[in-house]
Image: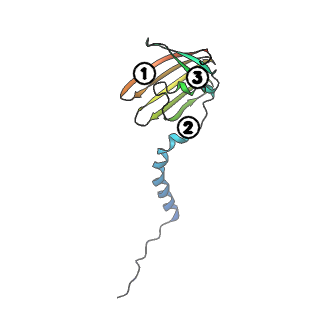
Amino acid sequence: MIDRAIPMPKKSSKRFWSRAVLAVLPAAFLFAPAAAQAPSLTMLGELQAGEWELRFRDGAPTRKICLRTGRELIQLRHPGRECTQYVVDNTATHSTVQYTCPGNGYGLTSIRKETTSLVQIKSSGIAGTRAFDFAAEARRVGSCR
């Protein structure tokens, strides 16, 4: 008995590469949020460091936070959490960031700069199992204690 290999049909390399790209493309979208973190949020970096007071429009109690980089304003309902951030909009006076905190929810925050010591914030999402939606004004009130 003669053992012969069955010849495989020749595929054009162009067709092979187009299929390879289509196979890898969905994986690229999985890693897009990590790549999207790269743009700096210049507007937030221009805010004055120090103690800021948050006044919520819904009448919730006033809250104070120590602002070092301005990014603390993005995740007010998820402070200190390791979250993936995706910059949706980034101009000299406005930043919008979508973020996801694995196992703890997500949010979308828009921050509009009026001055380097006064901003307007709108944020909504899910924290744990509870929905949130708020608007607030943040104003620098002094140095961090």
Q: Secondary structure at mark 3?
A: strand
In the picture of the structure, the residue carrying the numbered disc 3 is 67
Residue in view at x 49 percent, y 24 percent: 76
Colour option used? rainbow
Up/down of 1 relative to 81, above or below:
below
Farthest bottom residue in view? 1
Residue in view at x 45 percent, y 25 percent: 77
Residue in view at x 45 percent, y 29 percent: 107
Q: Residues within 10 Å of mark 1 (few under 14, many from 20)?
A: some
- Dividing the image into 4 quarters, which one contains the C terminus? top right
Do the residues under discs 2 and 1 have CB atoms within 8 angstroms? no
Up/down of 21 relative to 83, above or below:
below
Q: CA distance from mark 2 to mark 3?
A: 20 Å
Q: Position of residue 42 (x, y in %)?
A: 63, 29
Q: Earlier in the sequence, mark 2 or mark 1?
A: 2
Q: Residues within 10 Å of mark 2 (few under 14, many from 20)?
A: some
* Residue in the foreground of this view, choosing between 2 and 36: 36
- The quarter of the displayed image where residue 133 is located: top left
* Residue in the foreground of this view, choosing between 16 and 138: 138
Do the residues under discs 2 and 3 have CB atoms within 8 angstroms? no
Give the amino acid at mark 1: Asp
Residue in view at x 45 percent, y 48 percent: 26
Q: CA distance from mark 2 to mark 1?
A: 24 Å
The tag on residue 37 is 2
In the picture of the structure, the residue carrying the numbered disc 1 is 133
Q: Residues within 10 Å of mark 3 (few under 14, many from 20)?
A: some
Give the amino acid at mark 3: Leu
Q: CA distance from mark 1 to mark 3?
A: 22 Å
* Residue in the foreground of this view, choosing between 93 and 142: 142
User: Of tags 2 and 3, which is closer to the observer?
Assistant: 3
Give the amino acid at mark 2: Gln
